[in-house]
Image: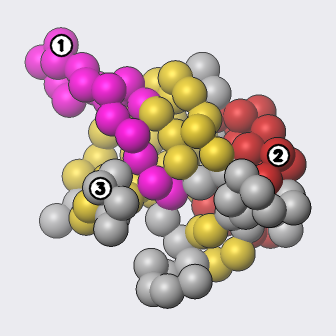
Amino acid sequence: MKYEYKAKITNVVDGDTIDALVDLGFKVQIMQRLRLTRVDTPERTQPGYAAARDFLRGLVEGKEVTITTHKVSKWGYFLADVVVDGRDVSDLLIVSNLGKPYDGGTK
């Protein structure tokens, strides 16, 4: 089941993982680590890591976004579509050649 929330991004962990203060409504907020859906970016030891992380920081850190949550990932984070200023963040990473399309299978 998918749910949509407003959130403020408090930290960019890497090119496809963020920390968000999620507004659950009724003045209830929760900090949550989220994994972006549909995209895979380089890991810390791989070329392109800093470029993807910094690009994502510039897009979302400190900003209000809309998230649509999906299931929990194999790493224990919620998978989420993230939209900022009407633009899908996963798509932006892919078209900028900073991430690859990813369906959740093995890499």
In the depicted view, which residue is nearer to us: 95 or 35? 35
22 in magenta: yes
In the depicted view, which residue is nearer to us: 60 or 87? 60
Q: Image quarter for residue 96?
A: bottom right
Residue occupying the point 87% across, 61% down: 47
Within 10 angstroms of label 2, few (less than 14), some, or many (20 or more) residues?
some
Residue 40 shows which numbered tag? none
Residue 27 shows which numbered tag? 1
Answer above or below: position of 60 versus 78. above
Residue 26: image x %, image y %? 12, 18
Distance CA(mark 3)–CA(mark 2): 23 Å
Residue interval drawn in magenta? 20-36
Residue 90: image x %, image y %? 62, 61
Which image quarter is the C terminus in? bottom right
Residue occupying the point 71% across, 52% down: 44
Distance CA(mark 1)–CA(mark 2): 35 Å
Give the residue number, with chain letter if any, for mark 2: 50
Give the residue number, with chain letter if any, for mark 3: 76
Hey, what amino acid is under mark 2?
Answer: Ala
Q: Earlier in the sequence, mark 3 or mark 1?
A: 1
Distance CA(mark 3)–CA(mark 1): 26 Å
Answer above or below: position of 36 versus 38. above
Residue 25: image x %, image y %? 18, 25
